[in-house]
Amino acid sequence: MIEFETAPIVRAKWTSLPAVRIGTPPTGSVEVTMCVVVRKGGEALMRIDYHGDQNEYSFVDEWIEWRGLVVLGAGENVHLISLVDHSLVTHRLGEDFGNYFAALHPLADRLYVTSGAQVFRIDPARNLVWASDPVGLDGVILSDCEGPILRGDGEWGPPGGWKPFAISADTGFHWFS
């Protein structure tokens, strides 16, 4: 089982671990926004040095192990790191406000990612299969993602302007329920 240990700094005992760096620290700084040590069976495998972008809105950070990958949702991106070769693939969740990372929804053969405005489907090879059209303005909750139709609610008029939606799991096409 994969476990994660986080800290707001890179601790001295972690400096010898193979590091994957995400983002760029501010000029003249080596500080991280978050350091994540990935462990399996108590053994440290690698460390992830995450440097958040000061210009991005960050709602929540979430990390999981999925199909041999460490998946980190943070800021306005989702990052997928191979546990085998430590290679990194990053998908930006959009350019507009509302495209901040919100949640990860892993299934056996696909990963759904929600932002504040959209739903994204990623395959096990780390490819972005589709991005839905906006289903909310400032919040997306995916409540059912296991069948051919994804269901959830998007907030269009904060606070409290939630509207239900449905999305095709295959194509990402959506309609309001």
Image (tube, grey):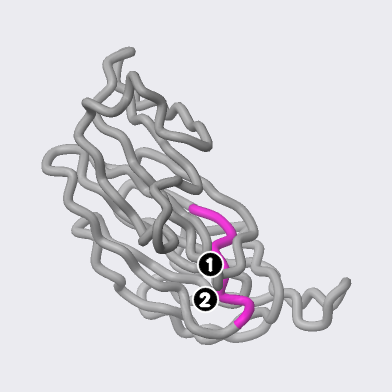
- Can you give x and y, in whole percent of width and height, for residue 149 in the image? 50, 69
Q: Residue furthest right?
A: 160
Q: Residue furthest top?
A: 42
- Which numbered circle lies on residue 60? none
- Can you give x and y, in whole percent of width and height, for residue 55 in the image? 55, 72
Kind of residue at disc 1: Leu
The answer to if 108 sits in the magenta stretch is: no
Q: Are marks 1 and 2 in contact (CB under 8 Å)?
A: yes
The residue range painted magenta reads 97-104
Q: Which residue is mark 2?
A: 167
Residue at (45, 46) in percent of width and height: 32
Q: Which residue is mark 1?
A: 150
- Considering the numbered disc 2 on the image, is that residue within a helix, a strand or a loop? strand
Badge 1 crowding class, 10 Å Cα cut-off, few under 14, some 14 to 19, many 20 or more, is many
- Considering the numbered disc 1 on the image, is that residue within a helix, a strand or a loop? strand
Kind of residue at disc 2: Ile
Q: Quadrant of the N terminus?
A: top left
Is 42 in front, or is 103?
Answer: 42
Q: Is residue 107 visible?
A: no
Residue at (46, 73) in percent of width and height: 93
Disc 1 and disc 2: Cα gap in Å?
A: 5 Å
Is 108 in front, or is 46?
Answer: 46
